[in-house]
Amino acid sequence: MSATAASISVALASSCRPSSSAWLNALAAHPAAPVSRADLLREVWGTGYDGGSNTVDAVIRSLRKKLGAVADRIETVRGVGYRLR
């Protein structure tokens, strides 16, 4: 796990569910590279998930809320997805 992911994990430790960690791990698996919404859904929930990509936006919004001061570490890459800085 990168130093960025480690610092975010500490911020999440008291306020998150294991699923939040799965989303963070999916982003951390691609350091500094943007990850598409479809790839995030596939990595976290598997290929059988039929929901829309706006589900990812809602999860990321919730994750940022939990992160508080380090929420800006999850960057939106317009037209692509998200990246962990």
Image (tube, rainbow, N blue to C red):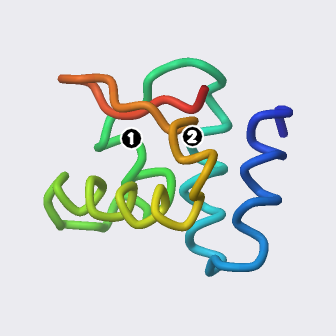
User: Label 2, label 1: how many angstroms apart (C-alpha)?
Assistant: 10 Å
SS category of the residue bearing label 1: helix
Q: Using a 10 Å C-alpha cutoff, classify the residue at mark 1 as few (fewer than 14 neighbours), some (14 to 19) or many (20 or more).
A: some
Residue positioned 61% across, 50% down in the render:
69
Q: Is residue 83 above or below residue 55?
A: above
x and y, in percent, of residue 50 in the image: 18, 66
Of 47 and 51, the residue lying toward us: 51
Residue positioned 42% across, 47% down in the render:
40
Q: Is residue 1 above or below residue 18?
A: above
Residue positioned 70% across, 66% down in the render:
12
x and y, in percent, of residue 56 in the image: 30, 56
Q: Which residue is mark 2?
A: 27
Mark drawn on residue 39 = 1
Report which quarter residue 28 is drawn in.
top right
Amino acid type of the residue tagged 1 in the rendering: Asp
x and y, in percent, of residue 11 in the image: 74, 60
**Mark positioned earlier in the residue sequence (2 or 1):** 2
Q: Is residue 34 above or below residue 20?
A: above
- The quadrant in which the N terminus is found is top right
SS category of the residue bearing label 2: helix
Report which quarter residue 45 is drawn in.
bottom left
Residue positioned 76% across, 35% down in the render:
4
- The quadrant in which the C terminus is found is top right
